[in-house]
Amino acid sequence: MSMTDETPGYTALIQAAIDREKDILGPDDAIECADSVDGLVVDGDGTVVDIERDGRAVLGDLVGAYVATAGDVAAFLIARRLENMCDREEVDLPENLAKHM
Amino acid sequence: MSEILAGVGHATDDDSTAAGRRAARAARDDLGGEERIAYAFGSSEYDQAALLGGIEAQLDCPVVGCSTAGEIAHAQSHTESVVVLALAGDGIRPGVGSAPEFAEFSRKAGMEAASAAVDDLDDGPVPTSVSASESGRRRWYPKLLVNAFGPGLTGSKEWALIGVQDALGWAHVSGGFAGDDWKLDSTWVYRDGEPVEDSMAVAAMDVDVKTGVGVANGLRETEHTFTVTSAEDNRLYELDDKPALEAYRDCYGDRVTQEHFLMTHPLGTDDDGEETHIAIMTDVDEETGSMIVGEKPLEEGQELTVMDTSADAVLDGVETAVDRALMAAGGPEDIAAVLVFDCNCRWYHLSNEETRNAELDIVRERVGPDVPVAGFYSYGEIATPNPLWNDDPRSLMRQDVHHQSIAIEVITNESL
């Protein structure tokens, strides 16, 4: 597993999940999903502007929103992207993501 | 009477060697005989060399298989695990072979791997099928049952199977192309216990029992059919005299370039009189409005139909595949083992573990509750069609590589 030197925060992981889904679902649907997550503020390009509650919970809800839209293959594909960014031993990931990493 | 014994082992240990050991030991313990060949299908999350080291430590036989995009064990869907199917008994005599340089010389790799597998039988000329008398008429069965495994992300799958055909003629082939848990980075083929990235591995089994292979996708045609008006090889430039992308956009809007859309709206290319073959669109080029469709050359005037990938259709495909395999195997009552090669893309249509297991429940219902069932989710399925399935002359057209399909191999305990 390749990792960056520093463990990324939840903001970076949430951004990576949105970016991955922009490829998969297309920008409109991916941003709409992100926008529907309570406590997650994104701009028109899908860039994370603010996280207003616990980052782990927001990441879990975001993955849940993508799973609701596209099936659990969405969680699997996001996990594949995120595992290149973080060590699952060091980051407390939400269950719907951790089970795929 | 010839007999085949089968045992399945499955493990989810984090440690690669321990997982390999545990799965192989369970398969061996389940076997009740001296193992003659083993199939291993393991998650790419494992250290592949350590995984195979663990498997080899427990089994005294050739091991073939590959890395996966998910594993199938005891007719259940899994990820990040390893499954081993071991076969024993006097009803099979296996040979294994492999060949490198798959990416650059796919046909040669297929031909050399198949040749090496049959040479390993050390028999000289080998019959690939036999004609058996049944109920006052004759019908043929595979005598040489061939399983092929190739890299999932490089080379030409179609040419590799033509290479197998170069060596073996109309031998019955099934298998799959290796996966890597959707990372689309590197896949491994297990070449007699060693993981390699650029080789094809073939197991050729001289069988004294009836076997059958069935394949289907189940996808149904939608009302959207296009005519190819400009194409070069497998790059599609125009549909209905418009840039291909524009024609597609006219029907479905801007989402046509999304990965999810491309997977859930594949194109049906040609049919075998019973089912439409699937080609997946990749590499959409916004600038030219063109797209790559499958591997085969497209012809002007050819019709391409957008396919319906609803879960119902996908599950119908499983029933068709199993029934075809059972019919090809002579409608057996005594089944020794079943191998399943299932396309990872079907996960887009079967949206969760429950529906994915519904696929395998259908297999289980058809073959019986105690039959060992193992396999993996692949990046392309291999299955030689059996013209017994229908009387449409198009069914004689050979098509060994399939997409968004499920291929089932049934090995019986009923003598030829």
Image (spheres, coloured by chain):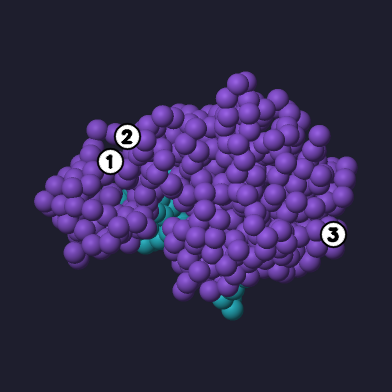
Chain colours: A cyan, B purple
Q: Nearer the viewer, residue B101 or B154?
A: B101
| Gap between marks 3 and 1 measured at Cα | 49 Å
The residue at the point 24 percent across, 57 percent down is B236
The residue at the point 43 percent across, 52 percent down is A40
Q: Which type of secondary structure does the marked residue at label 3 adopt?
A: loop
Disc nearer the start of the sequence (2/1):
2
The residue at the point 55 percent across, 42 percent down is B407
Subunit that carries the residue with mark 3: B
Q: Nearer the viewer, residue B119 or A80?
A: B119
Residue B46 can be seen, yes or no = no
Q: Which residue is mark 1?
A: B305
Q: Is label 2 in contact with label 1 (beta carbons under 8 Å)?
A: yes
Q: Which residue is mark 3?
A: B60
Vertical order, B258 against A65 (above or below): below
Residue A48 in the image: state x and y as whole percent.
40, 60
Kindly indicate whether the residues beneath marks 3 and 1 are on one polypeptide chain: yes
| Gap between marks 3 and 2 measured at Cα | 48 Å
Q: Which type of secondary structure does the marked residue at label 1 adopt?
A: strand
Q: Nearer the viewer, residue B105 or B12?
A: B105
Vertical order, B401 against B361 (above or below): below
Q: Is residue A10 left or right of residue A88?
A: left
Q: Which residue is mark 2?
A: B221
Mark 3 closeness class: few <14, some 14–19, many ≥20 residues within 10 Å: some
Subunit that carries the residue with mark 1: B
Subunit that carries the residue with mark 2: B
Marks 3 and 2: which is nearer the front? 3
Mark 2 closeness class: few <14, some 14–19, many ≥20 residues within 10 Å: some
Residue B289 can be seen, yes or no = yes
What's the residue type where badge 2 is placed? Glu
Q: Which type of secondary structure does the marked residue at label 2 adopt?
A: strand
What's the residue type where badge 1 is placed? Thr
Disc nearer the start of the sequence (3/2):
3
